[in-house]
Image (cartoon, rainbow, N blue to C red):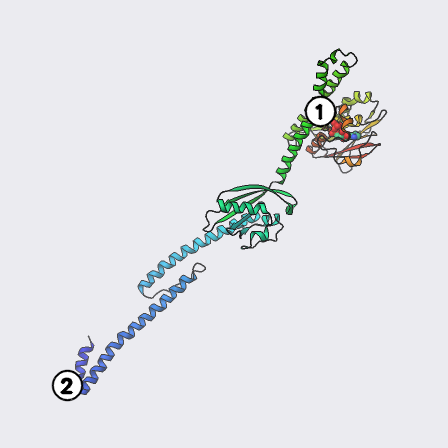
Amino acid sequence: MISLPLAIGWVRGDIASGSLLAVWIKLAVVLGCTSAIPLLLMSMQARRWRLRVHEVENFVSALPATVPELSPGGPAELQQLSHTLRAMSLRVRQGVERASRESSRREAILSCIAEGVLAVDSDLKIIFCNDAFATAFSARTPVSEGRTLYEVVREPTLRDILQRVLRTRSAEMDRLQLPTAGKKWFEARALPLNSEAKQAAVLVLHDITDLHNQEQLRKDFVADVSHELRTPLSAIRGYAETLLEGALEDKDNNRRFVEIILSHSVRLANIASDLLVLSELDADASFPASPERLSVPELVQSAIYSVENAAAQRKVKLNSERCQECYVLGLRFRLEQALVNLLDNAVKFNRPEGKVCVECAPEPSGRVRIVVSDNGIGIPSGDVKRIFERFYRVDKARSRPTGGTGLGLPIVKEVIERMGGTVTVESALGQGSKFIILLSPA
Ligand code: ADP
């Protein structure tokens, strides 16, 4: 617009002089100049936009790893867009940081828990495997993501569980014994991972060796109890039936049969009371809340009173002269019961004119030592390590007539261990046995 009056002013002289060529040339120059300036301006503006857009592009592609600075200025529209992008990028970055914090926390927890944890995808490729799981299978740790399950676990039961879970999309559970992990028993629980876009499953391996062994012990114990009860019960029933079927009138045998019934019922009563003691000991698993200060020689003396008659009948001599004053903490009736059981055995498994000796004294180490020794039949070396097991008897036939239950020594062991002490045995077949108790002093 400004160029038009300028151009007219410039060519006016040439029009007047009739120089048309000069007019055309000047008009062409004016036109050229007026159109070049906006083009130049536009190209400068376009360059600014291009640079800014390129900057925004770099900004977006660097997300979410870093949030680079966006330089201020530039076209207003792009400034607004940069502002919005920057606010959004900060939110994205916070979200990513939160998610990665959460994931490393979860990974740290899973890595240090005792249970083995394994996650696999639908091709049974490992997504996650903690050290506990790898150790159970003697695999090298850490187990890297992407390895196939087969490379780490050769156990078909686990593969089957995981395949079933991936197929049925429902939880599965199984028990298995791993030869690779010292024959330990495990409970494997597997669940589908629903949140994953691709199908996946997670498996948790729980070490139940202790539980399994306890269950086994309980089963064995019930079987042993039934077996122990069956013998006296069938003897009582058999002799009672014989008496009813006419032996009552048999003057030569009827008394003997009743005596046999009596001895078996005594045995049944002994088993019942020993089982009760053991179950009481099992129930109060801890040391008594208020233990008494017990004088050991006093307890030895009262235990000796309990076996005096049996010893006199078998002509076994009891000696407690080498008992020095010493004290321990515990329950009076329990420790006395343990001493009676040891003395009873020392008398029972002895010979006529045999000797039983009880000694007690504080040791140089400060502990209290109680020794019950006899010069009786002794215990074969192969049986020594088993005699504290429930119902274990070296010679069942010999133990039964004496009313033995095979629970006397297990009771001794339980009582002494509950008091924080130990009981051991030294024995030589045909020469005698020595039971040594060590307890903390009071
Ligand atoms: P029992 O009721 O048979 O005496 P225990 O548990 O007290 O049961 O003892 C287990 C077994 O250990 C006995 O049957 C016996 O064979 C052996 N035993 C225990 N004490 C002695 C001992 N002093 N001398 C020889 N054998 C013993």
* Residue 325 visible in the picture: no
Looking at the image, which is closer to me, 39 or 261? 261
**What count of labels does the image hold?**
2
The quadrant holding residue 361 is top right
Amino acid marked by disc 1: Thr
Residue 311 vertical position relative to residue 46 in the rendered view, above or below: above
At label 2, counting other C-alpha atoms closer than 10 Å, the crowd grade (few under 14, some 14-19, many 20 or more) is some
Between the residue at mark 2 and the residue at mark 1, the CA separation in whole angstroms equals 148 Å
What amino acid is found at the position of numbered circle 2 in the picture?
Answer: Ile
Residue depicted at 63% across the width and 30% down the height: 283
Q: What's the residue at 63%, 43% (across, down)?
A: 184
**Disc 2 C-beta below 8 A from ligand 1:** no
| Image quarter of the C terminus | top right
User: Residue furthest toward the front?
Assistant: 245
Q: Position of residue 251 (x, y in %)?
A: 78, 11
Q: Say if residue 35 shows up in the picture.
A: yes
Q: Is residue 163 above or below residue 47?
A: above
Give residue 432's position: percent from left, percent from top.
82, 31
Task: State left or right for residue 43 relative to residue 109.
Answer: left
In the picture, the disc for residue 97 is none
Badge 2 element: helix
Q: How many other residues sit within 10 Å of disc 1, few (<14), some (14-19) or many (≥20)? A: few
Label 1 C-beta lies within 8 Å of the nearest ligand 1 atom: no
Task: Tell me, for residue 15, which label it has, or none.
Answer: 2
Q: Quadrant of the N terminus?
A: bottom left
Residue 41 in the image, given as x and y percentages of width and height: 29, 73
Of mark 2 and mark 1, the one earlier in the sequence is: 2
Residue ID for mark 1:
231
**Residue 302 horizontal side relative to residue 52, left or right:** right
| Residue 203 in the figure: left or right of residue 353 | left
Q: In the image, ligand 1 is in what quadrant? A: top right
